[in-house]
Amino acid sequence: MRSLHKISPVLLVLAFAVWVPSAGFAELAKWDQERVTAIGGELTKACDALYDTFRKEPQSTIGSGQSSAYYRLRQLIRRVKGEARYLSSSLAKGEGYDQTLPIYDNLSILVRDASEDARRMFSSGFVLEKATAAGDLMRRIAPYYDPQALEEG
C-alpha cells in the first residue's frame, strides 16, 4: 500500500495555496460571484469524494499504533467536507467575499491540520487522486480570497 507521505505534499499544496501568492493571482483581482460560486460547487463535490474514498480505505493499510491518528485524519477530512459545503452554500445564496472569508479561512486551517496528520498515515492511490482534485480546486478559488489580488480590483 502507498503511504500518505505521497498524499502529504498534495495536502501541503492545498494549505500553501491559501497563503502563498502566485503569478496567477494578479489576473483574478476582482470578485466574480458566479465564478467563485461555480468553483465552490466543484470543491464541495471534490471534498465529498475525498471523504468517501478515505472512509472506504481499509484500516488494515494503517501502520501499527496509528489507529487514533487515522481517526483524527478522518475527522479532519469530514470537517473539510462540511466546511467546503458551507462555503459553497453561502456562495450560492449570494454571499460575497466579506461573508465567506471566515469560512474560507477555517477551511484553510482544517486543510493545514489534515496535511500535518497525513504525514503519519498510510493510504491508497485512490485517496491521493481525490486529494489532488480537491487541491486543484483550492488553488482555483484561492485568488478570490487573496487580499493583494482584491486590492488591485
Image (cartoon, grey):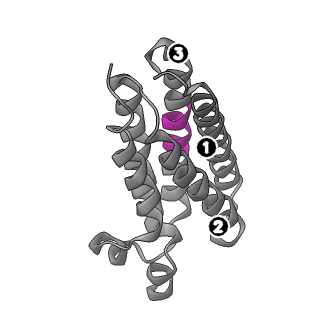
List x then y, in percent, for residue 144: 49, 68
* Three-letter code for the amino acid on which mark 1 is drawn: Val
* Three-letter code for the amino acid on which mark 3 is drawn: Gln
Is 50 a magenta residue? no
Q: In this view, does 126 lie above or below 145?
A: above
Q: Do the residues labelled 2 and 1 touch (CB within 8 Å)?
A: no
Please state the total of marks drawn on the protein image: 3
For this rendering, which residue is in front, 82 or 123? 123
Residue at mark 1: 80
Q: Is mark 3 on a helix, strand or loop?
A: helix
Q: What element carries label 2?
A: helix
Q: Residues within 10 Å of mark 1 (few under 14, many from 20)?
A: many
* Residue 129 left/right relative to 90: left
* Three-letter code for the amino acid on which mark 2 is drawn: Leu
Residue at mark 3: 59
Q: Residues within 10 Å of mark 3 (few under 14, many from 20)?
A: some
The quarter of the displayed image where residue 85 is located: top right
Residue at mark 2: 101
Q: In the rendered structure, which disc, 2 or 1, sits on the residue that comes first in sequence?
A: 1
Q: Residue furthest front?
A: 65
The part of the chain drawn in magenta is 41-48
Q: Tell me the mark number nearer the camera, choosing from 3 and 1.
A: 3
List x then y, in percent, for residue 77: 59, 37
